[in-house]
Image (cartoon, coloured by chain):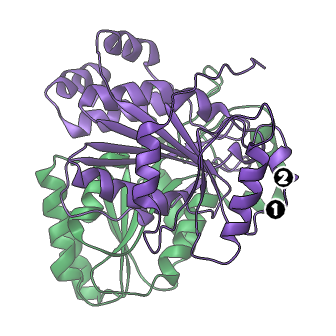
Amino acid sequence: MDLDEAISEFQSHDRKALSRLLSFAAESEHIDEIRVFLDKKEHSGKTLGLTGAGGVGKSSLIGKLIELLRKKDQMVAVLACDPESPLTGGALLGDRIRMSRPIDDKGLFIRSLATASGHQAIADNLDVMIQLLFAYGFDKVILETVGAGQGDIAIRKHADVLLVLLQPEAGDDLQWEKAGMLEVADIIVINKSDLPGADRVAAQLKNQLSFPGADDIPVVQTSASTGKGLDELWNTIQTAPFRKIVLKES
Amino acid sequence: MARPESSKGVVASYGCGSGFCRAQHNPQLTLFKIVFFDEMTEHLTAKRVVLAKIGLDGHDRGIKVVARGLRDAGFHVIYAGLWQPPEAVVQAVEDEDADWVGISLLSGAHLTLVPKIMSLLKDKGLNEVRVIIGGIIPEDDIVKLEKMGVNKVFGPGTPIQEIVDHMSTGES
C-alpha cells in the first residue's frame, strides 16, 4: 500500500491504512505529506502518558485502564514504546501481551514501537502518530514509555496528562529529590501497592511534595493485579489540571 | 525511503555511524546477516514480525528462542504470547503492520487453527503478510500447510540462522 492509497483508504476508515500510515511515520517516510494531510483535521482527543522504570507495571496498568475506558465506550489506542538494540537495530516488543482484549474489539488499537537509543525513549514522529489516531476516531491515546525514570522526559510534551509510575521499595526519599523524575508528573502512581512497603513510599512522597514551593501532585496507589485504586486513579486523571510544562530545549 | 524488498537480503536498518560500525566490528554479531544501509537517508527499516502461540498450548520455550534470535538479527519482534485465539493474532498483524507472522504449535492442532489464521488474513486483505510455522508438525502435514499458503514450516532443531536467512532473503 503506497502513500496515496493509504491516505485515500484512511479516509474511508480502513484500519490497514491507519496501520500503514503509522509505519510510514515510524520510519520517517512521507512525513511531510502526512503532516499536510493531517493539518486539516480537528479532534478533541486526549493523550495519557505512562512512564516509569521497566517492570513497574506500565503495560499491566494500561491493560486495566483499557478495560475501564472500553466500558465507558471510549475508543482507545495505545502506542507502546520499547527500546531497540543499539548494536543490531533489533527489538523485542512485548507490551501487548499484558493488554488482553475481547476478540474483535474494533474500539481498541495497540501499536508497538521500537525506539532507537538516544531518542529519549520515545519513537520518532510520535506527534504525527497521535494525530493519525485521533483523526481515525480514537478518543484516548495512551502512550507508554520506559524512561522518565531519571531524565528521558520527552514524553512530557506529548501527554495531556502524564502518570509517573513507581513501586514499593523503589528507593529512599533522596531519589524523589532528583531532577526530572517527579517534576514532570501530573500524577504519581504507586503501582503494585498490594505489596508491602507501598504505604511507606506514598508517605515519603507526600512528605516531599508538601515542602514549601513544591507542586501539589496527587499520589495514587494502584494494583494492576488486584484492581485496587483504579477508580480513584481514573477520577484523579479526569480532574488533573493540565499543567503546560515548557521543556528546556537541549 | 521505500520499504525495502525482502529479496534484497534486507533484515533491518538503523541510523548510520557508530551503531553500524560497532555492529560490523562486534565478532558476536558476525553470526548474523545484519543490515541494509542506505547512505542517502542514513535510515534503516527493520522488518516487523508478530510471533504467537495459538490455542491451548503452553510450551513457549521454542518461540522465545526464536524471538531472541530474530531480535538479535535486527528484526522488530512483536511477541504476542501464549494462548492466543487466531482472531487476536490476525488483529495484531493488522495493527502492527507486520511483514511476517510466526506461529508455534506443539499441540497437534495445526490443521484446525492454521487454516483459521490463513482465512482471517485473507478476509482482512493482508495478502502480503507471510506466515511461518514452527513446532511439532508431521511431514505429511507440512505439505498440507504449504498448500494453504503457509510460507515455510520449521521443525525442531532448526538453527536460528536458517530462519533468519529465510526471512532475510525471502527464499522458500
The letter of the green chain is B
On the image, the x and y values in percent for residue A247 come to 70, 22
SS state under label 2: helix
Q: Is residue A208 above or below residue B39?
A: below
Q: Chain of mark 1?
A: A
Q: Residue at x 29, y 16 (%)?
A: A42
**Residue under numbered circle 1:** A171
Q: Nearer the viewer, residue B60 or A143?
A: A143
Tags 2 and 1 touching, CB below 8 Å: yes
Residue B172 can be seen in this image: no
Label 1 Cα neighbours within 10 Å, binned few <14 / some 14-19 / many ≥20: few
* Total marks in image: 2
On the image, the x and y values in percent for residue A138 come to 28, 36
Whole-angstrom CA distance, mark 2 to mark 1, is: 6 Å
Q: Is residue A223 above or below residue B62?
A: above
Q: Residue at x 44, y 55 (%)?
A: A232
Q: Nearer the viewer, residue A27 or A80?
A: A80
Q: Amino acid at mark 1?
A: Gly
**Residue under numbered circle 2:** A175
On the image, the x and y values in percent for residue B95 come to 32, 47
Q: Nearer the viewer, residue A100 or B144?
A: A100
The letter of the purple chain is A
Q: Residue at x 72, y 36 (%)?
A: A183
Q: Amino acid at mark 2?
A: Gln
Q: Quadrant of residue A65?
A: bottom left
SS state under label 1: loop
